[in-house]
């Protein structure tokens, strides 16, 4: 059972404890489903595990969080994500090895994840340097983001997981995306206890 921290209580209110317990259980089930799928297809690569985990992480979180009071589901890029207490809960598997969440980096600086972080994540800690040059026009944000109310904040659920070791690290919090190298710059993050 996870301890409810002051940040979690302030962020999620009365449902903080239920979320802190449900999220690790959901991602543990997602890992188990992906591992079983990999074993079922008997591939020599981990492709089935990786693709399976990506898909089932959303399914398990949606199923596990739908009973939380006030939770609502939205569809983003054909995946169901949950909004709880005006926070969109979004999973990111950031590593296949046991490394700190501060090593988390996106594969691309564009697309749904990047746009979601820019639109609903925290304000950047350091503004961009204005050299007085004409700025390039920002590309339109991903079309699915209209499903997320403008005042909704993003809570990333970042985890390190491998087929052999399962979920090794799991943290939640808020981060901005550094465009130059795609690293997540955490404004706040804290661990969630992994069952078993």
Image: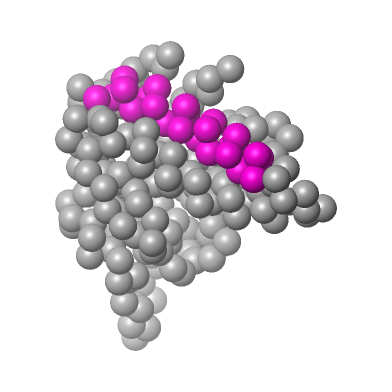
What percent of the width, then of the height, locates residue 27? Answer: 50, 35
Q: Measuring 43% from the left and 14% from the top, which residue is drawn there?
A: 1
Using the rendered image of the protein, determine whether residue 187 is visible from the camera's viewpoint.
no
What percent of the width, then of the height, locates residue 75? Answer: 31, 57
User: Compared with residue 181, is residue 184 higher up or lower down, i.e. above or below?
Assistant: above
> Which secondary structure class fits the magenta region best?
helix
User: Compared with residue 55, is residue 99 higher up or lower down, i.e. above or below?
Assistant: above
Residue closest to the eye, 87 or 57: 57
What percent of the width, then of the height, locates residue 188? Answer: 39, 36
| Image quadrant where one finds the C terminus | top right
Color scheme of the displayed model: one colour
Q: Measuring 26% from the left and 44% from the top, which residue is drawn there?
A: 83
Q: Is residue 11 left or right of residue 114?
A: left
Using the rendered image of the protein, determine whether residue 25 is visible from the camera's viewpoint.
yes
Whether 115 is among the magenta residues is no
Q: Measuring 34% from the left and 49% from the top, which residue is drawn there?
A: 81
Number of marks: 0
User: Compared with residue 153, is residue 189 higher up or lower down, i.e. above or below?
Assistant: above
State the image quarter where residue 100 is shown.
top right
Whether 20 is among the magenta residues is yes
User: Compared with residue 76, is residue 175 higher up or lower down, i.e. above or below?
Assistant: above
Q: Is residue 184 left or right of residue 89?
A: right
Which portion, as a residue range, is magenta? 15-37
The outermost residue toward the right is 44
State the image quarter where residue 21 is shown.
top left
């Amino acid at each position: 059972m996870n301890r409810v921290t002051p940040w979690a209580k302030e962020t999620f209110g009365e449902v903080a404890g239920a979320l802190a317990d449900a999220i690790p259980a959901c991602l543990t089930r997602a890992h188990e489903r992906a591992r079983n799928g990999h074993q079922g297809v008997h591939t020599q690569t981990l492709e089935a595990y990786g693709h399976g985990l990506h898909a089932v992480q959303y399914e398990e979180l949606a199923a596990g969080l739908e009973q939380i009071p006030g939770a609502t589901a939205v569809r983003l890029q054909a995946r169901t994500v949950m909004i709880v207490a005006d926070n969109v809960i979004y999973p990111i598997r950031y590593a296949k090895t046991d490394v700190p969440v501060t090593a988390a980096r996106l594969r691309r600086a564009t697309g749904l994840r990047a746009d979601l972080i820019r639109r609903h994540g925290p304000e950047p800690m350091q503004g961009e340097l204005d050299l007085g040059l004409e700025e390039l026009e920002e590309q339109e944000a991903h079309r699915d983001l209209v499903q997320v109310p403008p005042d909704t904040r993003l809570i990333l659920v970042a985890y390190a997981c491998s087929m052999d070791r399962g979920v090794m690290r799991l943290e939640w919090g808020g981060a901005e995306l550094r465009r130059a190298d795609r690293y997540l710059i955490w404004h706040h993050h804290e661990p969630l206890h992994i069952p078993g």
